[in-house]
Image (cartoon, coloured by chain):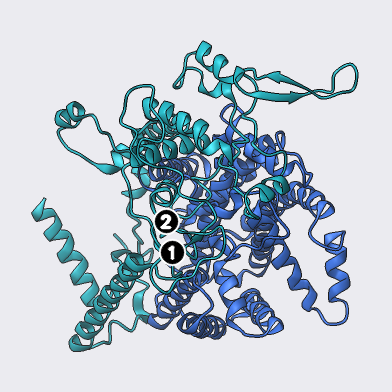
Amino acid sequence: MAPVLGQFGRTVFSNFAKGYSHPKVYLSNTSSSFREMSQGKKILLTTGCFLTTAAAGLAYSLNESVKAIDLNLHPPKYPWPHKGHRHEPELLAALPFRKLELDKAIGLYDAASLRRGWQVYKQVCAACHSLRFVAYRQFVDLFMTEDEAKAEAAEATITDGPDANGKMFQRPGKLADYIPSPYPNEEAARVANGGAYPPDLSNITVGREGDEDYVFSLLRGYADPPAGVELGENQHFNLYMQGNAIAMAQALYNGLIEYDDGTPATASQMAKDVTHFLAYCATPELESWKKYLFKWTIISTCLFGLAWYYKRHLWASLVYRRVAYRDVNKKH
Amino acid sequence: MKKILNNIFFIPTPSNISLMWNFGSLLGLSMVIQSISGIFVSMHYCNNTLLAFNSYIFLSKIIENGMILQMTHAHFSSIIFIIMYIHIMKSLLNKSFNKKQMWISGNLMLFMIMGSAFIGYVLPWGQMSFWGATVITNILSSIPFLGKKIVFWVWGSFSVDNPTLNRFFSLHFLMPLMILAMSMIHLSILHEKGSSNQMGLNSSKDKIYFNKSFMFKDLISLMLMVMFYCLMLSFFIDFHFSMAKENFFPADPLNTPLHIKPEWYFMFAYAILRSVPSKIGGILSLLILFLLFILLMFNKSNYSKFFFKKKMLIFIFLTCFIILTNMGYKLIEYPFTEISLFFGMLIILILPLM
C-alpha cells in the first residue's frame, strides 16, 4: 500500500510542481500561470492554501460546538434504542467492534419501554395533551396483544354519530378509533389551562429542535427559578424551554404511577418511557423505513458494482487506444 | 420514432468527457423519480386548508409505506438542488454559458424548479409553509403602485388562504410538466450543438456514439446516487433533515414562528435578501444577481478554464455561495448581517469578471 501511495503522491506532487493540475491537461495547459511561478511563491501559495483550509476547519468546528445563535440551553444527546443504542449486555459483549453508525441503521423500538410509555401517557399526559394521529390498532402486535388493545380501546369513550335520530351518541372505543382528545377544541384547552395550549403530542419528538432529547430534558428540566428571575402567574421555571418559562407544571415525580411490569417508576424512567412512546407515535413506520433502506443499500451497492464493471468492460478498448498522426508526405 | 431513437442512441458524444458530465442525465432521472413519487403523494393529498395538514400527516403515519413515499418526495427536492448546483458549477467551469440557447433554457429550468420547490413547500400547510408563503408572496408588494393589488391577485384572497393553497396545488402539478418539456428542449439544443469537454478543446475532434458506453456510464451515476442516498440516511443523516421543525404543526395565522426560514437551497438568496436593510434594496440586489447570472451568456472573456485567475474566480464564487448559505441560518445581528452583505456584494461583483 505504502509504495503505491508514495508513487501516487510523487506523481501528483511532481505534476503540481510543474504546474499541471491533472496529467490529462498536459497539452492544453499552456495558459496556466502556475508554470511561471517561482519555487518560493509556489511554497507560499501551498502553505497559504493549507492554512486557509485549516482556519476554515477550525471555524466550522467552533461553530458546530457552540451553535450559539439562540440564548437557550441545548439538550445533551441521550442513547435511544431506535436511534441505535443497544442495552443488552450479552449482545454488546458478543460484538467484536462497536460502531454507532451501524447501530443507527439497525436500532429498533424497545417494546417493553413502549408499553410502559403508553401507561405513562394514559395516566399522566392524556389529562391535557391530545394524540390525534395514533389509533389503538397500531398497538396490536407491537407492544400489546389484540385482546389487550381491544380492552384498552373499550376504556375510552368516543363520540360518534349522528344516529338515526340525528343525535350524536357516546360509545366505547374500538380498535379502529383514534385516541380521543381531552378537549373538544383549542379554545376549551386554553381556558382549562390558564391560556396556554397544550400541544398535540403526535409530532412532538420530530417537531422540536433536539427531538427526543429535548422532550426528555424538558420533562426532567424543572428547577427553582434563580434569584432575579420573575415568573408570571401559572408559569414554571424550566431549563430547556425557550425563555425558561413554561405553563406546564412538573408532571413526573418518583413513584407517581406503578408500572405493570414492576419496573421502579422513577421520574427519569417515566420520562424516558413516555418519550420513547411519543417517538414511536411520531414515526410509526421507522422500522419498515430502515428495513427498506437496508435492502436498498445492499441492492444499489451490488447494482453499482455490476454497472461499473460492465462500463469498464465496454470502455476497455476505448480507454487504452492510442491515436497516432502519420506524416503523409514522408515516404516509408 | 426511428429518428427519436437515433437521436438518443447514436448521438455523437465526445469520448473524453468525465463523470462531471453525468449530472445532467442524473438531474433528468431525479426529476422522473420526483414526478412519479409526486403523483402517488397527490393521490393522498387534500388541497383544502382544513384538511391539507391532516392529509399530509396521515400519509406519513397511517397509510401503508406512506412515510417512505413522503420522505422520498421531500428528500429528492434537496437532492435535485444538490445535483443542479453541481451541474451549474460544471457549466461555469467549462464556459458552457457561451452556448446562449442552452444557458437560457437551463436558467429558465432553474427558476421554474425553484418556484416549484417553493410552491411544493407550501402544500403541507404546516406553520413554516404558511409563513414562508406569506413572506415570499409579500415580496411582490414592494412593486411600486401595483404591488398591493398584485399580492391580492396572487393570493386570491386578503391573506394566504384556501384559494392560494388551491392554486398552488394546481401550479405544483403543472410546473414539473413544464420543466420536463423544457428539459426536452434543453436536451435537443444540446444534441444540436454537442457537448463540451473538460480539455477545453473542440469536441468534434474525437467522438463516439452515445449508445451503450454512455448509457452504462449514466447508470453508474444513478446507482451511485441511490447508494449514497441509502447509505447516508441509514448511517449518518436524520430522516427528517429536510423538514423544518415548525412544519410538523398545523398552520396558525395568529402565531408567527420565532425564525421564518426557507430550505437550505434558498438560503443564499434569503441571506442576500435580508442583508440589505430596506425591503426593495434586498429584492433589487437579488434581481441584479439573477440578471447578471443570465447575462453571463454575453461573456466574451478569453480566459481558458485552466487559467489560474479563472479558477480562483470560480473558487471565490463557490465560497461566497457556501458562506451565504450558512449566513441565512443566523440571526439578524451584528457580525452576520455585515458578513452576508459583504459576500452578497462580492458574489454580484464577481459575476461580470468571470
In the rendered structure, the colour chosen for chain A is: cyan
Q: Is residue B11 above or below residue A172?
A: below
A254 to B249, vertically: above or below: above
Q: Amino acid at mark 1?
A: Gln
Q: Identify whether A160 is placed above or below B172.
A: above
From the top left corner, tell me how far across and down residue B352 is, in percent.
57, 84
Q: Earlier in the sequence, mark 1 or mark 2?
A: 2
Q: Name which quarter of the figure residue A200 lies in.
A: top right
Report whether residue B153 is seen: yes
Q: Quadrant of residue A227?
A: bottom left
Tag 2, which chain? B
Q: Could you tell whether A207 is left or right of A325 in the image?
A: right
Marks 1 and 2 in Cβ contact (< 8 Å):
yes
Which chain letter matches label 1?
A: B
- Which of the numbered marks, if any, corresponds to residue B18? 2
Q: Which residue is mark 1?
A: B198
Measure the C-alpha gap from mark 1 to mark 2.
7 Å
Tint of chain B? blue
Badge 1 marks a residue whose secondary structure is loop
Residue occupying the point 69% across, 50% down: A191
In this view, the residue in front, B305 or B273, is B273
SS for callout 2: loop
Question: Closer to the camera, B29 or A154?
Answer: A154
Residue A132, percent from left and from top: 63, 36
- Tell me the number on the disc at residue A208: none
Q: Nearer the viewer, residue B120 or A222?
A: A222
Crowd class of label 2 (few under 14; some 14 to 19; many from 20; radius 10 Å): few
* Residue A92 drawn at (x, y percent): 19, 32
Residue A7 at x, y percent in the picture: 13, 59
Residue shown at the point (48%, 56%) measured from the top left = B21
